Image (cartoon, rainbow, N blue to C red):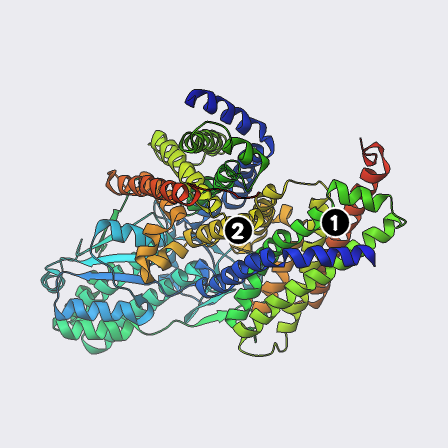
C-alpha cells in the first residue's frame, strides 16, 4: 500500500509542473543575477597598489626617493604617476588615481572622497611628515644622535605577523548564494503546505476522497511528505549543481556535504509548510501568506538582503541565529567552506533534523482525528 | 464603474491577507533602515579593531589607547571561531594580539613579530593597520635612539603620530552633506524592494480573482468595452497602490521623526512614481495568469533580482560598469540614482533627477501598454472563446 501511494504521490508532484519549474528556475535566475552583480566586487576589495598622482611643486628629492622606494617594491604600496597639477586633477576626476600628493615645502594630499585608499594615502604622507619632524628635532636638539635616529627610522620593521584565520573561500559575497539556496530550501514549504490540504476533507475534494479511503492517515501523510521531500531534493540538487558547476560558485572542497545540507534544508522547508498547512482554522490564502511572510523575514534575518545582518544579530541576540531555520541552512555552507572541522556543521545538521521531526510531529498532532459533520 | 466596484469588493475580501504582507514588509523596512547604518564599507575610515593584550604592560596599554584614538575598539572572545565569524561578518575589521614580552622587545629595539594579526584576506584594512603598527614601532624606536626612556618615547611617539596631514577635497567635488535624516535616507533606499514586494504580493491576488475564467467570461459578454474595463482596472489598482504607498509614507514619517521637509519631499515623489511602476508591473505579470502559489516566487525573483542588480542592497559604485550598463534600463537604477543625490553620495543635478523620474514614469507607462496589449491579444483572439 505504501509503495502504491508513493508512486501516485510522485506522479502528482511531477504533474505540479508550475511549482517544480519555478522552484528550479527561481535560484537559476537569481543565481545568474547575483553572479553578474557580485562578480568583481570581491576581487576589487582585495588590496592592490593604490594609484596616486604626485605633483612636485618644489624641489623635494628626499620625498621623491621615499615615493620611488614604496612604489618600486615587489608588491608596492603605491602605484605612482608623476604629473603636472592639471593632468593630476584630470586623473583624479576620472577616478584613475585615488589622490594627488603635492610635494613641495610641505606635503599635502588632495582627494575626491573618503575611503580606505584615501586613508592609506593620508597615513603615508603623515608617516613621511612624522619622520621628517623627528629628524629635524634631532638635528636641532641633539645632532650626535642623528645617525642612530635615522637608522631606527630606516630599519625595515615587520612588527606584525599575519595569520589567515581560514584556508576556505573568504569572499563575503558568497553568503548571498548560501542564502539563496537556503531560500529555495525554505520555499519548499509551499509544497509542504499542500500536503495537509490534499489530505484533509474540509480543505479539498482530493482530501475528502482520501479521507473516505481505507488508507490510514499516517500512511497517506507520510507518503505525501516523502514525495514532497523527493521533489524538493531534486530542485535543490539542480540548484546547487547549477551554482557550483555553471556559475562556478566556490563552495569549498566538500561539495557532497553541501548537497547533503541543501537536501536536509529542503526537507525542513517542506516540514515547515506541512506544519503551517495543518492549522486548519485558517483559509489557504492566509496560510500561504503567513508561510511566505515568515519565510521572507527569516531569509532577511539570515542576510539574504543585507549580508552582515547575521553578524549584527550575533552581537545582540546570538541565540536567534541558532534557531532561525534559514540561518541554520546558510550556516551549514559557511561552516563547510571556512571551518576545517565538521563539529559546527554537524550541530547545524542535527538542528535541521530536529526541526523536521518537530514540524512533522506538530503537523500530525494538528491534523489527526478530524471528524466532519459537514464539509 | 462596475469593474472598479468589483475590484474593491474583491479587495475587501483579500484585505486580511494584504495586511499580513504589509505588516511583514513594514517590519522588514524598519529593520533594514536601522540595521544598515553604513553608507558603504569603503567610506568607513575608522576601523573596528579588536586587541588582545597578552603583554598587559603600560607600553601595551598605551598602544591600545593609540589604536583607539582613530578606530573603534571592539571586544571579542579569544576564540578562533568567534574571531573568524567576526571578521567574516565585519563585526571586526582587524584582530590584533600584542604578544607577551612586547614591552621588553620594544625597549631592546627587537620589534619584529611583536604582534600577531588574524586576517581573512589581504584587505585594505589589513594593509593600513600593518602600516600603522610598523610606523608606531619605528617612531618609538627612533625616540629611544634619541635618548628617551621607553615611556617618554611612547608618549612622544603618540604626540607626533597624532598630527594630521593636510587633506583637501578636489575643487570639482561639490557633494554636500544631506539635510535629510540618515534613517529616512536608508528607509527610502530600501523602499524599492519593499514596494515591489508589498505591491506584487497584495495586488496579484485581487487581479487574479478578477481574471478567473468565470468572472472574465461574464465580463467579456457584458456591455463594457474592453478599453473601459482596462481603464477601470488601472484606476482601481492605482487607488489600491496609493493606499499601500501611504502606509509606507506614514512609516517613513515616524522614522523621520516628523513631517518631511526640503529635499525629503523629492524622496517621497520618487517613491510615488516607483510605486506606479510597481503597480503596472504587477498588472503586466498578472496578464500571464500565474498560479496563485507562484506569485510569491515571481515576486521574489523580480524584486530581489532588480534590487541587487540596481544597487539597492549593494552600493552602485561597488557594482561593475557592465552591471550598471544593464541596470540603466531598469527604473530601480534611476530610483537609486535620485536617492544617492538626496543622501549626498552624488552631486545633486536637477536635470538627472527629472530624467530619472521621467524614466521611472516611462517604464510604468510601458508596462501599462504591454499589459493592455497582452490583454487585447488574449481576449480578441481564439482564446477568448470558452471551450
Task: Return the chain for callout 2.
Answer: A
- Asked whether residue A23 is in view, the answer is yes
Q: In this picture, is A220 found above or below A102?
A: above
Task: Return the chain for callout 1.
Answer: B
Question: Which labelled disc corresponds to residue A282?
Answer: 2
In the shown orientation, is residue B50 left or right of residue A374?
A: left
Q: Position of residue A279 (x, y in %)?
A: 47, 48
Q: Nearer the viewer, residue A314 or A111?
A: A314
In the shown orientation, is residue A234 left or right of residue B86?
A: right
Q: CA distance from mark 2 to mark 1?
A: 35 Å
- Image quadrant holding the N terminus of chain A, namely top left
Q: Nearer the viewer, residue B31 or A109?
A: B31
Q: Quadrant of residue B360?
A: bottom right
Residue closest to the far front:
A373
Q: Position of residue A335 (x, y in %)?
A: 31, 42
Q: Which residue is under mark 1?
A: B367
Q: Nearer the viewer, residue B11 or B118?
A: B11
Residue at 59% of width from left, 52% of height from top?
Answer: B310
Q: Position of residue A333 (x, y in %)?
A: 36, 40
Residue at 46% of width from left, 44% of height from top?
Answer: A278
> SS of the residue at dot 1?
helix
Q: Nearer the viewer, residue B60 or B336?
A: B336
- Whether callout 2 and callout 1 share a subunit is answered no
Q: In this picture, is A216 found above or below B262?
A: above
Q: Position of residue A225 (x, y in %)?
A: 44, 33
Residue at 18% of width from left, 53% of height from top?
Answer: B113
In the shown orientation, is residue A160 left or right of residue B246?
A: left
Amino acid at each position: 500500500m505504501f509503495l502504491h501511494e508513493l508512486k501516485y504521490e510522485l506522479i502528482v508532484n511531477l504533474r505540479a509542473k508550475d511549482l517544480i519549474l519555478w522552484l528550479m528556475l527561481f535560484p537559476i535566475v537569481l543565481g545568474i543575477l547575483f553572479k553578474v552583480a557580485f562578480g568583481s566586487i570581491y576581487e576589487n576589495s582585495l588590496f592592490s597598489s593604490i594609484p596616486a598622482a604626485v605633483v612636485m611643486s618644489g624641489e623635494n628629492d628626499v620625498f621623491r626617493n621615499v615615493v620611488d622606494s614604496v612604489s618600486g617594491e615587489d608588491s608596492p604600496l603605491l602605484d605612482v604617476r608623476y604629473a603636472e597639477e592639471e593632468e593630476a586633477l584630470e586623473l583624479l576626476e576620472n577616478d584613475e588615481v585615488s589622490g594627488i600628493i603635492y610635494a613641495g615645502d610641505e606635503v599635502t594630499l588632495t582627494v575626491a572622497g573618503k575611503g580606505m585608499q584615501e586613508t592609506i594615502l593620508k597615513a603615508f604622507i603623515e608617516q613621511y611628515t612624522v619622520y621628517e619632524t623627528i629628524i629635524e628635532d634631532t638635528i636641532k636638539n641633539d645632532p650626535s644622535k642623528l645617525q642612530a635616529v635615522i637608522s631606527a627610522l630606516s630599519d625595515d620593521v615587520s612588527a606584525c605577523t599575519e595569520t589567515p584565520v581560514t584556508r576556505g573561500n573568504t569572499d563575503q559575497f558568497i553568503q548571498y548564494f548560501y542564502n539563496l539556496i537556503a531560500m529555495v530550501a525554505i520555499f519548499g514549504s509551499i509544497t509542504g503546505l499542500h500536503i495537509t490540504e490534499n489530505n484533509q476533507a474540509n480543505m479539498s475534494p482530493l482530501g475528502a476522497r482520501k479521507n473516505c479511503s481505507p488508507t490510514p492517515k499516517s500512511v497517506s501523510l507520510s507518503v505525501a511528505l516523502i514525495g514532497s521531500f523527493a521533489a524538493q531534493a531534486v530542485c535543490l540538487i539542480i540548484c546547487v549543481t547549477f551554482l557550483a558547476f555553471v556559475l562556478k560558485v566556490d563552495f569549498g572542497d566538500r561539495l557532497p556535504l553541501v548537497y547533503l545540507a541543501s537536501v536536509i534544508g529542503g526537507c525542513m522547508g517542506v516540514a515547515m509548510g506541512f506544519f503551517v498547512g495543518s492549522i486548519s482554522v485558517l483559509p489557504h490564502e492566509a496560510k500561504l501568506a503567513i508561510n511566505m511572510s515568515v519565510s521572507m523575514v527569516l531569509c532577511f534575518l539570515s542576510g539574504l538582503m543585507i549580508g552582515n545582518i547575521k553578524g549584527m544579530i550575533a552581537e545582540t541576540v546570538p541565540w536567534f541565529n541558532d534557531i532561525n531555520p534559514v540561518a541554520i541552512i546558510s550556516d551549514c555552507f559557511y561552516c563547510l567552506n571556512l571551518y576545517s572541522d565538521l563539529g559546527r556543521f554537524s550541530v547545524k545538521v542535527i538542528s535541521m533534523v530536529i526541526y523536521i521531526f518537530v514540524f512533522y510531529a506538530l503537523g500530525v498532532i494538528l491534523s489527526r482525528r478530524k471528524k466532519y459533520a459537514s464539509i | 464603474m462596475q469593474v472598479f466596484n468589483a475590484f474593491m469588493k474583491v479587495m475587501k475580501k483579500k484585505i486580511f491577507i494584504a495586511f499580513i504582507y504589509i505588516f511583514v514588509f513594514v517590519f522588514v523596512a524598519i529593520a533594514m533602515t536601522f540595521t544598515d547604518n553604513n553608507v558603504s564599507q569603503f567610506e568607513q575610515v575608522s576601523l573596528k579593531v579588536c586587541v588582545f593584550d597578552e603583554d598587559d604592560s603600560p607600553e601595551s596599554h598605551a598602544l591600545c589607547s593609540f589604536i583607539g584614538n582613530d578606530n573603534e575598539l571592539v571586544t571579542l572572545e579569544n576564540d578562533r571561531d568567534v574571531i573568524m565569524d567576526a571578521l567574516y561578518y565585519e563585526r571586526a575589521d582587524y584582530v590584533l594580539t600584542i604578544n607577551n614580552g612586547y614591552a621588553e622587545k620594544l625597549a631592546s629595539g627587537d620589534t619584529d613579530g611583536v604582534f600577531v594579526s588574524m586576517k581573512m584576506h589581504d584587505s585594505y584594512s589589513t594593509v593600513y593597520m600593518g602600516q600603522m603598527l610598523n610606523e608606531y614601532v619605528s617612531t618609538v624606536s627612533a625616540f629611544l635612539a634619541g635618548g628617551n626612556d621607553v615611556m617618554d618615547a611612547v608618549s612622544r611617539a603618540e604626540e607626533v603620530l597624532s598630527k594630521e596631514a593636510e587633506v583637501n577635497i578636489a575643487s570639482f567635488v561639490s557633494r554636500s552633506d544631506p539635510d535629510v535624516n540618515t534613517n529616512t535616507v536608508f528607509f527610502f533606499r530600501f523602499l524599492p524592494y519593499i514596494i515591489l514586494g508589498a505591491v506584487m504580493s497584495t495586488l496579484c491576488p485581487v487581479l487574479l480573482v478578477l481574471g478567473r475564467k468565470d468572472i472574465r467570461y461574464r465580463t467579456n459578454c457584458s456591455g463594457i468595452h474592453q478599453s473601459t474595463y482596462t481603464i477601470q482596472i488601472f484606476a482601481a489598482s492605482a487607488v489600491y497602490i496609493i493606499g499601500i504607498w501611504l502606509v509606507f509614507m506614514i512609516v517613513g514619517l515616524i522614522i523621520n521623526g516628523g513631517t518631511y521637509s526640503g529635499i525629503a519631499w523629492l524622496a517621497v515623489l520618487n517613491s510615488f512614481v516607483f510605486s506606479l511602476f510597481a503597480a503596472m508591473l504587477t498588472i503586466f505579470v498578472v496578464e500571464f495568469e500565474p498560479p496563485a502559489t507562484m506569485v510569491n516566487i515571481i515576486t521574489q525573483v523580480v524584486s530581489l533580482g532588480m534590487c541587487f542588480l540596481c544597487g539597492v542592497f549593494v552600493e552602485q559604485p561597488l557594482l561593475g560598469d557592465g552591471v550598471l550598463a544593464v541596470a540603466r534600463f531598469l527604473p530601480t537604477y534611476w530610483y537609486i540614482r535620485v536617492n544617492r543625490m538626496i543622501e549626498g553620495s552624488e552631486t545633486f543635478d536637477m536635470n538627472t533627477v527629472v530624467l530619472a523620474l521621467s524614466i521611472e514614469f516611462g517604464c510604468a507607462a510601458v508596462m501599462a501598454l504591454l499589459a493592455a496589449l497582452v490583454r487585447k491579444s488574449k481576449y480578441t483572439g481564439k482564446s477568448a472563446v470558452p471551450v
